Image: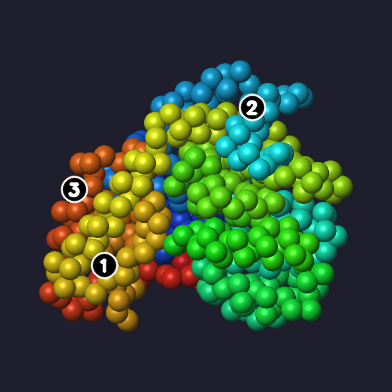
Amino acid sequence: MKQKTGQNLYKEAKKLIPGGTQLLSKRPEMFAPEIWPSYYSKAKGSKVFDLDNNEYIDMSIMGIGANILGYSDDDVDRAVINAVKNGVSSSLNCPEEVELAKILTTLHPWADMVRYARGGGEACAMAVRIARAKTKRDKVFFSGYHGWYDWYLAANISNSDMLDGQLMPGLDPNGVPRNLQGTAVPFHFNDIDELKHKSKGLEKEIAAIIVEPARGEDAPKDYLLALKNFSKEIGAVLIFDEITSGFRMCPGGLHIKYGINPDIAIFAKSIANGYAMAAVIGNEETMNAAQSTFISSTNWTERIGPVAAIATIQKYIESNVADRIIEVGSRVKDVWRDMSKKHGLPIKVSGLPTLGSFSFSTEMNQSMMTFFTVEMLKKGFLGWRQFKPSFAHSDRDIEKYSDAVDEIFQKISISDIKDILKTPEAHTGFSRLTKE
């Protein structure tokens, strides 16, 4: 298998693009340094083709969870192509943004109004801005990962590891104004007592409480209910960040299954099957605060995002996509459990069926995981510690993947990882890269 073209291009990219890529989660060093193919020439269904025309079944992150229907879905692409032919922007607004707003508020009857963006980070920033405008307060208490904007990284100004427990270690707040110190305060998932302890005496300064209803595991219903009650008690805006969890277990936000409604919910990723689109939905009282501040962008008015979102959501509902991806994800989690048991490997499997992950329960986990990824490439898979299923994954994909996991787990079980890993270890968090 020839794999040089992508890595050679990536070496060139690091001289031209700070950090090598636009998204940390797509850096080759996060998977298999010097080996990961880095770039794609084509993606269709569950398949990805690299620059050397190698074909892989993607049993990893599926576009960081954005491609919920699979790559280049015919129905979504057809709608987008038609939109392109009719013009994606003009001096007037596209009617599809109204149609999409109706769909989102129908799926979420508690929500009255919608604003759009084109990325998850900017949607989070918009939601926080709206909350601050409504409450005329500054502080934001949060749990989970919510992007790269100043309001979030401000948590690391006084202590550079405050965000380490929120998914991504090593994030430095360089470039974030120092006077934002103390405006963003993290608390741990499912720890309402910590939230109340940290907020004691600050209740009238808190503009918003923002959480992910799920990233790894489901949030307990009692926890979300406690958040809702506490936010109402102190007059703060409750924001559910559904950028990762939305449209993965049901049509719309995962909070629908809990029956607990926030003041604002945020969507991106799966909402448009890989096309740039994000939405902020909320009750009328909260969302109207957007008119008291300035939130605006030329590219939020283009047509492709709303058209892709409408087509994605319609197919998601009509084809019962949630049921299928839950089934696929559950089967893959069973593969990890069964094969680790077969070969006597200590393993931890976690996450929702549609956001599953595994790790080896040993201090050599990172080396073992890197070896797993490298060997998966040899067998024609993009394979990693996470798997985000799509509607395009077939039963045959799962069967072939199971056979590959069986063989690779066996190799790991009978070998000293120090002897068989011939490549550098994958990175585990944010690291600065040299130009090379």
Task: Name the side, left or right, on which 121 lies relative to 366.
Answer: right
Q: Which comes before the other along the chain, label 3 or label 1? A: 1
Q: Residues within 10 Å of mark 1 (few under 14, many from 20)?
A: many
Q: Is residue 248 above or below residue 223?
A: above
**Residue 279 % position (x, y):** 63, 43
Choose the circle earlier in sequence order: 2 or 1. Answer: 2
Q: Earlier in the sequence, mark 3 or mark 2?
A: 2
Q: How is the image coloured?
A: rainbow
Label 3 sits on residue: 400
Determine which of the numbered discs, if any, sits on residue 99 in the image: 2
Q: Amino acid at mark 2?
A: Glu
Which one is closest to the eye, mark 3 or mark 2? 2
Secondary structure category for the residue under label 1: helix
Q: Is residue 320 left or right of residue 269?
A: left
Residue type at tag 1: Phe
Q: Which mark is residue 371?
A: 1
Tell me if residue 313 comes above or below residue 64 in the rendering.
above
Mark 3, Cα crowd under 10 Å, few <14 / some 14-19 / many 20+, is some
Front residue of 359 and 259: 259
Q: Is residue 139 left or right of residue 268?
A: right
Please report the residue visible at 81 percent of the width from the left and 69 percent of the height from the top: 205
- 327 or 259: nearer the eye? 259
Disc 3 vs disc 1: which is toward the camera?
3
Tell me whether the residue at label 2 lies in contact with that at label 1, contact meaning CB atoms closer than 8 angstroms: no
CA distance for labels 3 and 1? 19 Å
Q: Please report the residue visible at 82 percent of the width from the left and 48 percent of the height from the top.
A: 289
Query: Disc 3 versus disc 2: distance between alpha carbons?
Result: 41 Å
The amino acid on which the numbered mark 3 sits, given as a three-letter code, is: Lys
Measured in 3D between alpha carbons, the distance from the residue under mark 2 to the one under mark 1, in whole angstroms, is 47 Å
Q: Position of residue 222 (x, y in %)?
A: 55, 64
User: Helix, strand or loop at disc 2?
Assistant: helix
Number of on-image labels:
3
